[in-house]
Amino acid sequence: MAMGRPKSTLVLDSELREQLESLANSRSLPAGLVRRAKIILLSASGKNDREIAPQLETSRNTVGLWRRRFLAQGVSGLYDELRPGRPRPISDERVAQLGSQDAEDETQSSNALEYSSDCR
């Protein structure tokens, strides 16, 4: 006999499932977002919070939180919300620009290195 409150059924259409699978399989997105997408996919497959939590190494409360947020807000609810505190001094666009510039600099510097066998 099941104990606790019955959970709302979670039904995903093919487009939404595909979007969540893309998030869950990403290696470039934040780990938290990937875990949240996996929580929703496992929940939609019929697993309960007790089964999902140990599989994803999180708590049952966390599984329930993200499940409820997804039901209320959809996929956008899985993303981190803005947190209070001092705003970042550099915009996200500038950070991305600097990151790509660093990668280019490393490539150019590694191509410029020449090794000599002349040991004096």
Image (cartoon, rainbow, N blue to C red):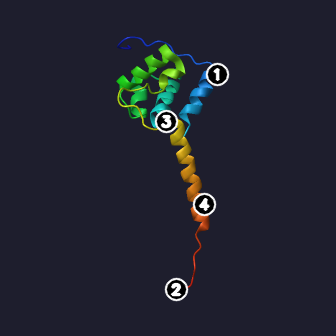
Q: CA distance from mark 4 to mark 3?
A: 26 Å
Secondary structure at badge 4 equals helix
In this figure, which residue is indicated by the disc labeled 4?
108
Question: Pointers 4 and 3 in contact (CB under 8 A)?
Answer: no
- Judged by depth in the image, the label closer to the viewer, 1 or 3, is 3
Q: Disc count in the image?
A: 4
Residue 98 image offset from top left, x and y in percent: 53, 46
Q: CA distance from mark 4 to mark 1?
A: 44 Å
Residue 42 image offset from top left, x and y in percent: 50, 26
In this figure, which residue is indicated by the disc labeled 3?
91
Callout 4 amino acid = Gln
Residue occupying the point 59% across, 58% down: 107
Callout 3 amino acid = Ser
- Judged by depth in the image, the label closer to the viewer, 2 or 3, is 3
Q: Earlier in the sequence, mark 1 or mark 2?
A: 1
Secondary structure at badge 3 equals loop
Residue 81 image offset from top left, x and y in percent: 43, 25
Residue occupying the point 64% across, 22% down: 15
Q: Is 27 above or below relative to 53? A: below
- Judged by depth in the image, the label closer to the viewer, 1 or 2, is 2
Q: CA distance from mark 4 to mark 2?
A: 25 Å
In this figure, which residue is indicated by the disc labeled 2?
119
In this figure, which residue is indicated by the disc labeled 1?
14
- Judged by depth in the image, the label closer to the viewer, 4 or 1, is 4
- The image quadrant of residue 50 is top left
Using a 10 Å C-alpha cutoff, classify the residue at mark 4 as few (fewer than 14 neighbours), some (14 to 19) or many (20 or more): few
Q: Earlier in the sequence, mark 4 or mark 2?
A: 4
Q: Earlier in the sequence, mark 4 or mark 1?
A: 1
Q: CA distance from mark 2 to mark 3?
A: 48 Å
Question: Pointers 4 and 1 in contact (CB under 8 A)?
Answer: no
